[in-house]
Amino acid sequence: MPIEKITTDATTSTHVTWTETAGGSGNVHLALDADDTNYARCTTVTNAFIVSFGDLTADIGSVNSIRWYINGYDSQFRGASDVVSFDLLNASGTSYSLSENKTFTDRTITDIQAGTERTTYDGSNVWTEALVNGLRMKVTWATENNASCVLDLDHLYIDVDYNVPPTPTYDDTLNNITMNSGTSILSGGTIILD
């Protein structure tokens, strides 16, 4: 089953204490869309932002599961420990109630932390392409072990495990031409149907 990675494409809600380190703006999605040295940085605990993700580009038959990933660390001092809450939201900003906490320390910069693989969005109904295309995530710095902590997050993305649509089948005993989709233009030549 193929997997498509979708990355952050917009900051839909921000707080002044969350900035991107490369540009200093509140557009934290720019810091989270790639694994690089541009971080989403915060210096004040309990503040949050919400980002959206790009749409799926593959030909999707059905979605098997989704799983989000993030890396980050506390860049201020040794022994720092920050707990961050990650909450999946729908396109309207309503929580799916799938919130998870991850801990970041001064040693977690190279660690990619993963959320739980989710095959359903509510315990019984499977994800659809439309639901995945509307995903947002609320990220809240929940707790810190020192008031001097500085949290840096980088590369937030979602892996979507999916099935491709079945290949259409045709009755080859019929005398006809069948096209699944598209347009054919004949501008010259000879076509012989035998």
Image (cartoon, helix red, strand yellow):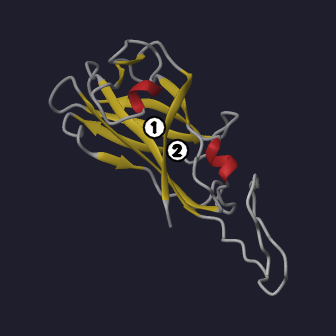
Tell me if residue 189 comes above or below residue 93 in the rendering.
Answer: below
For the residue pair 184 and 148, the one nearer the viewer reads as 184
| Residue tagged 1 | 85
Q: Position of residue 126 (x, y in %)?
A: 66, 60
The amino acid on which the numbered mark 2 sits, given as a three-letter code, is Ser
Q: Position of residue 181 (x, y in %)?
A: 75, 58
Q: Position of residue 82 (x, y in %)?
A: 32, 33
Residue 102 placement, left or right of 132: left
Q: CA distance from mark 2 to mark 1?
A: 7 Å
How many numbered circles are shown?
A: 2
Q: Which mark is residue 178?
A: none
Residue 187 placement, left or right of 49: right
| Residue tagged 2 | 99
Tell me if residue 38 comes above or below residue 181 in the rendering.
Answer: above
Residue 56 placement, left or right of 183: left
**Which residue is at the far left?**
78
Q: Is residue 62 visible?
A: yes
For marks 2 and 1 on the same chain, the one whose residue lies earlier in the sequence: 1
Residue at screen point 33% across, 17% down:
22
Mark 1 surroundings within 10 Å by alpha-carbon count, few (fewer than 14), some (14 through 19), many (20 or more): some
